[in-house]
Amino acid sequence: MVLSREQIESVLAVMDGVTDEGLRNGKEVDVYDATEEDEYKVIIKRFNDNTKYVFGKGWSTMKYSLDLEEGQELKLYWHRGYKRFIVLNFQYTLLMI
């Protein structure tokens, strides 16, 4: 999965322990799905040309668990306190009583 360069760089700027070498080799991050209470470990990696970031190892497991299809948008929020991404891809249900 290719990540938006502008958006991921704004998150990387506030993450602890991010280095250029670490991004080339891959940095492990936690991703939490609050609706299912699942947590995933995924590698963020930057290609050598510094123009593209991807989710690598761990992405397939997360993709299938979240039932994502090609072309679907994945919405994530970086939680500074918990130091992990929070999945925002969930349906709101309004219950009227």
Image (spheres, rainbow, N blue to C red):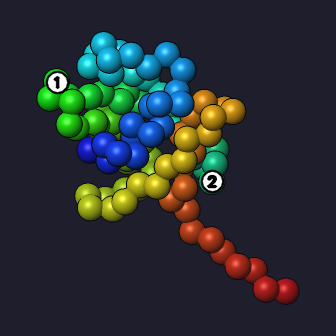
Q: Which residue lies furthest to the top in this view?
A: 21
**Is residue 32 depicted above or below 13 in this figure?**
below
Left or right: where does residue 42 sit relative to residue 92?
left
Mark 1 belongs to which amino acid? Asn
- Secondary structure under tag 1 reads loop
Return the residue at label 1. 48
Return the residue at label 2. 35
Q: Going from the N terminus, do you reach mark 1 or mark 2 first?
A: 2
Where is residue 97 drawn, in percent x and y?
85, 86
Where is residue 85 drawn, in percent x and y?
54, 40
Left or right: where does residue 74 sit relative to residue 16?
left
Residue closest to the eye, 32 or 3: 3
Residue ID at (26%, 19%): 24
Characterize the local packing of mark 2: few (<14), some (14-19) or many (20 or more) Cα atoms within 10 angstroms: few
**Is residue 79 depicted above or below 12 in this figure?**
below
Total marks shown come to: 2
Residue ID at (63%, 53%): 35
